[in-house]
């Protein structure tokens, strides 16, 4: 039985906002977008997104 591991990332969008997205090990992320991660849970990624907004690296939605 093979379980595919999934990770969460914070990805900066073209409009300056950041989006929390989940990727499996086999999916590819776009390297031209600024991103932070990998995080094991969505909650960790959301906490990072909030920190990035406070630091001025991402715009609030």
Image (cartoon, helix red, strand yellow):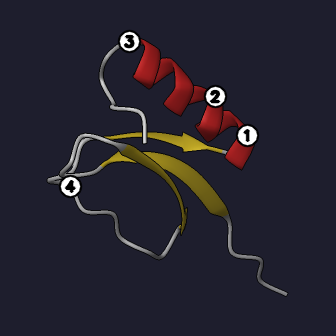
Q: Residues within 10 Å of mark 4 (few under 14, many from 20)?
A: few
Disc 1 or disc 3, which is closer to the eye? 3
Q: Which residue is mark 1?
A: 43
Sequence-wise, the earlier of marks 4 and 2 is 4
Give the left or right position of residue 12, taking residue 31 as reference: right
Sequence-wise, the earlier of marks 4 and 3 is 4
The single residue placed furthest to the left in the displayed view is 32
11, above or below 56, in the image: below
Disc 1 or disc 4, which is closer to the eye? 1
- Please give the label number shown on residue 55: 3
Give the left or right position of residue 59, taking residue 10 as reference: left
Disc 4 or disc 2, which is closer to the eye? 2
SS at circle 1: helix
Q: Marks 1 and 3: CB-CB under 8 Å?
A: no
Residue 40 place in picture, x, y as percent: 69, 46
Q: Marks 2 and 1: CB-CB under 8 Å?
A: yes
Q: Marks 1 and 4: CB-CB under 8 Å?
A: no
SS at circle 4: loop
- Please give the label number shown on residue 47: 2
Q: CA distance from mark 1 to mark 3?
A: 18 Å
Residue 23 place in picture, x, y as percent: 52, 66
Q: Marks 2 and 3: CB-CB under 8 Å?
A: no
Sequence-wise, the earlier of marks 2 and 3 is 2
Q: CA distance from mark 2 to mark 1?
A: 6 Å
Q: Residues within 10 Å of mark 1 (few under 14, many from 20)?
A: few
Q: CA distance from mark 1 to mark 4?
A: 23 Å
Q: CA distance from mark 4 to mark 3?
A: 22 Å
Residue 41 place in picture, x, y as percent: 73, 46
| Viewer-side residue, 23 vs 61 | 61
Q: Which residue is mark 4?
A: 31
| Viewer-side residue, 7 vs 4 | 7
């Amino acid at each position: 039985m093979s379980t595919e591991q999934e990770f969460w990332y914070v990805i900066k969008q073209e409009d300056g906002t950041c989006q929390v997205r989940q990727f499996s090990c086999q999916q590819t992320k776009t390297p031209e977008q600024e991103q932070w991660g990998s995080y094991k849970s969505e909650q960790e990624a959301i906490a990072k997104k909030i920190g990035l907004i406070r630091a001025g690296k991402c715009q609030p939605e």
